[in-house]
Amino acid sequence: MRTYGRTYDEYGNATWVEVTTDANGYNDAVYVTALIQCLKLNLGESPFWADWGIPARPSVMTQVFPDYWMALMQQRFASHFTSLTLTKLPSTTPTYQISVITQQGSSIEAVIAV
């Protein structure tokens, strides 16, 4: 499998990086990257996957956190990991902590502002 994710350098320049299955055949990095890309995707932005993404702009305008959509993303990706939790953080902007335990048993944590 493969997917692409954006990384930013210290000057804010974005580059796309290819993420593939690792040497042992695990796709954990691919699915973590896909999850983060889906959380950065606006709802309806993709012509192929219109129901994937988060309604970020309406959430910011109405000040209602996209908890339903985050729960939906957690449900869609949970089967690919041993454990996946998306937790809302106390903030004025929609910010969530992602905690993943991969199939290999390693732990990955990230904070994402949607």
Image (cartoon, rainbow, N blue to C red):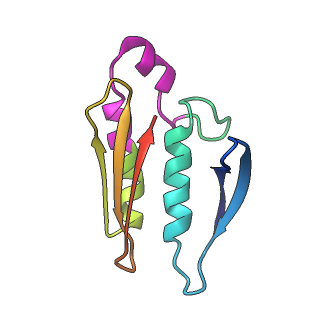
Say above or below: 93 vs 95.
Answer: above
Residue 52 visible in the displayed image: no
Say above or below: 106 vs 41.
Answer: below
Residue 23 found in image quarter = bottom right
Count of number-bearing discs: 0
**Residue under the point 36% across and 52% down:** 98
Residue found farthest to the top? 62
The percent position of residue 49, horizontal first and vertical second, equals 60, 40
**Residue under the point 41% across and 56% down:** 77
Residue 88 found in image quarter = top left
Instruction: Give, as a single range, the part of the protein colored magenta.
Output: 51-72
Residue 70 lies within the magenta run: yes
In this rendering, position of residue 62 left or right of residue 14? left
**Residue under the point 64% across and 36% down:** 46
In this rendering, position of residue 35 left or right of residue 11? left
The percent position of residue 17, horizontal first and vertical second, equals 70, 59
The percent position of residue 89, horizontal first and vertical second, equals 28, 38
Residue found farthest to the front? 10
**Residue under the point 56% across and 83% down:** 25
| Viewer-nearest residue: 88 or 74 | 88
In this rendering, position of residue 79 left or right of residue 114? left
The percent position of residue 4, horizontal first and vertical second, equals 67, 56
Say above or below: 4 vs 1.
Answer: above
| Viewer-nearest residue: 10 or 33 | 10
